[in-house]
Amino acid sequence: MISKYPKVKDCSLIGEYPALVKSGGGYVWDEVLEYRVWCHPENGAPDIENGDDYYYFFKTYEEALQFSEGNLGTELPVALILQEEYIDEPEPGKYIHVKAQRLTEWPVEFLSRPKKKCQTIPNFLSPNAPSNRLEILRGQA
């Protein structure tokens, strides 16, 4: 079965990443590390962590979605991604190239953007970038 979302970088590392990571942002992605489904006891998920939220990890989006749809108190799947470098936007329209690695959870829909290439960020920040810079991230410019 062909997935509509990318494969994880290394199946042997699934479940080894920290639970607490950034959420969203950065505009670009380098690797998908795992897919996660967060569970909330206050919404009907089993209370196995003394009332705290918890997650299950999966190697494919489809496995995560099947789990999410079949269990109470769960969110839709998110992707844990690796960003080797990323674009910060501290205020609307002001972009900064951050040359640091980070892990962040993204809505899987963001993975419809092409994987970052070596020129993605320089092209995005270029004074010659199209007025809609997102075209670069979407692979349309």
Image (spheres, grey):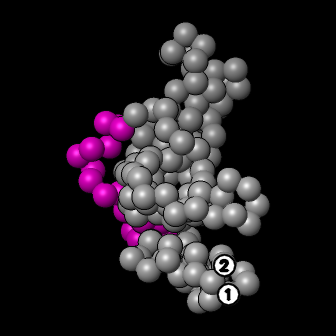
Q: Taking 80 as reference, is 50 left or right?
A: right
Q: Quadrant of the N terminus?
A: bottom left
Asked whether 129 or 77 is in front, the reply is 129
| Residue plotted at (73% across, 84% down) | 131
Q: Is residue 105 visible?
A: yes
- Residue 33 in percent (x, y) is at 37, 51
Question: Is label 2 in a helix, a strand or a loop?
Answer: loop
Q: Which residue is mark 1?
A: 130
Residue situated furthest front in the rendering: 127
The residue located at (52%, 63%) in the rendering is 97
Q: Considering only vertical position in the picture, is 100 above or below 134?
A: above
The crowding category of the residue bearing disc 1, from other C-alpha atoms within 10 Å (few below 14, some 14 to 19, many at least 20), is: few
Q: Amino acid at mark 2?
A: Arg
Label of residue 96 in the image: none
- Is residue 44 located in the magenta-colored stretch of the structure? no
Residue at the spot 58% in from the left edge and 44% down from the top edge: 23
Residue 30's spot in the image, x, y percent? 40, 63
Which of the pair 22/76 is nearer the observer? 22
Residue closer to the observer: 115 or 62 = 115
Check the image and name the residue furthest to the right. Answer: 92
Q: Amino acid at mark 1?
A: Pro
SS of the residue under disc 1: loop
Q: Tell whether position 16 is magenta.
A: yes
Residues at circles 1 and 2 in contact by the CB criterion of under 8 Å = yes
- Check residue 133 in the rendering and tell me which mark sits there, or answer none: 2
Query: Which portion, as a residue range, is magenta?
Result: 1-17
How would you classify the magenta stretch by its main secondary structure? loop
Q: Position of residue 69 (x, y in %)?
A: 61, 44
* Residue 130 against residue 27 in the figure, above or below: below
